Amino acid sequence: MYFSDDGGERVTIEKFVCALALDKLSPRVSALYAKLWAKLDPTDCGHTDANCIDAVLKNKSFMDKILQRWSSGVITKDEWYQAGLEGAMMHPNDNNFIKMIESFWEICENEEAAVNEKQAM
């Protein structure tokens, strides 16, 4: 089943509601996104820029796509979260979406990262 994390027939109610509502990330993706945002905005100023993005970006060819979307190179936390929602809609399976995020960014779901409550989404 497409929305199942393990490829089986079962889907949690939370996953089902997230897929319908498309207004929040799953807990796993949200936790990874919070870790990534903490790296992108280390001073907790509410935005990131091209220099911070480039420092955390593993797949440098992706930078062109980022600059196409945000020509100024500055991304606010709200814009970043919205981009995450759009990505989650295109990749509703958490395992696949997390692997994709990990392939583009210097982040790993299982790594420890200092994320304070204010930065968590």
Image: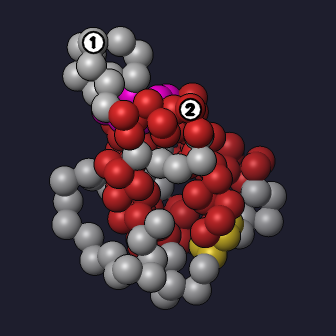
Q: Position of residue 84 (x, y in %)?
A: 55, 48
* Position of residue 108 in the picture relative to residue 97 (left or right): left
* Position of residue 108 in the picture relative to residue 32 (left or right): left
Does residue 85 lie above or below 7 as drawn?
below
- Element under disc 2: helix
Residue 55 appearing in the image: no
Q: Residue furthest toward the front?
A: 13
Q: Residue furthest toward the right?
A: 71
Instruction: Residue type at mark 2: give it.
Output: Leu
Magenta segment range?
91-97
Residue that label 1 marks: 9
In this rendered view, identify the residue nearer to me: 17 or 120: 17
Does residue 6 lie above or below 22 as drawn?
above
Residue 30 occupies which quadrant of the picture? bottom left
Residue that label 2 marks: 20
The residue at 42%/71% (across/down) is 120
Q: Position of residue 91 (x, y in %)?
A: 49, 29
The reply to whether callout 1 and callout 2 are in contact (CB within 8 Å) is: no
